[in-house]
Image (cartoon, grey):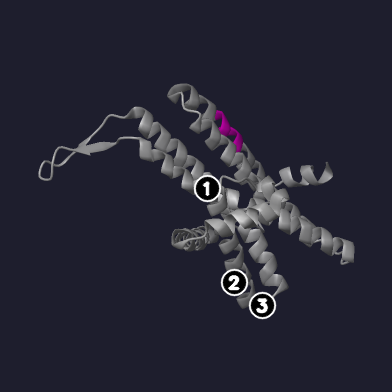
Amino acid sequence: MKIINEIFNDELIRHLAISVFLYVFLSIIVTSITGSFLNIMLGWNIILAFVPVFFAYIFMITSKKENKSLISKLKLIIIFLVWLLFFPNSYYVITDFIHLGGEEFYYSLGMYSGWIYTDNFLGYLTLTHIFLGAFIAVFMASYSLKIIHSFLIVKYKKNIAIIILFMILTLSSIGIYIGRFLRLQSWDVFRFINIIKQFIQSLDVFAFQYILIFTVIQIALYYFTNPFINIENSRA
């Protein structure tokens, strides 16, 4: 209970938690308007995207304690692995834009007739809802990743930290691929052997392309958002 109080004493964590709550509330309202269960799932995805923030902050608190015993180190490793397990849920929200494929925003009357844009209010409402969720999720992803990255820079050389960061984002891309195409969740890790088998069986040219694209996307998003996140001054 003490560590939870310490986490939510942080101003930025509180702000993110409130943002998640408001987004879930918004998801309920949008669902009632559109009648689509998709919007409730978007709310759930944002809750999952917040989980890595929670564990990254616990990791930061634990890593700053002076206790260097074997148990403390094992505890830190376990927290890191839990964070890594849930981390792909943050950037995964970007893939929710695929749900716009069923919406019609414009159509063409012919090659030389130009475009006609529709007054598809529900489509634009869904677009706005997904964009808001992706915006919040990307910020939370960058925040939790910066905590881990900062630790790696202190613990190891800068170049080694970059290599580990790249490995984390590659694993995250694999997690996003598994979540989107194999429809598996973070808690399916308890069927780890099954996941590995399904993943290997699914590998083809597209899988490698998808993983590469999302690794590049995550690197770019982290690079652009990194200067706006100051984990040292986030406490109230």
Return the residue nearer the eye: 132 or 35: 35
Q: What's the magenta region?
A: 20-25
Q: Secondary structure at mark 3?
A: loop
Q: Determine which residue is flagged by label 1.
A: 180
- Residue 43 on image: x %, y %: 56, 35
- Note whether residue 104 is visible: yes
- Note whether residue 140 is visible: no
For badge 1, the amino acid type reads Arg
- Marks 2 and 1 sit apart, C-alpha to C-alpha, by 27 Å
- Marks 1 and 3 sit apart, C-alpha to C-alpha, by 35 Å
Residue located at (66% from left, 71% from top) = 153
Mark linked to residue 157: 3
Return the residue nearer the eye: 8 or 119: 119
For badge 3, the amino acid type reads Lys
Q: Quadrant of residue 21?
A: top right
Q: Determine which residue is flagged by label 2.
A: 162
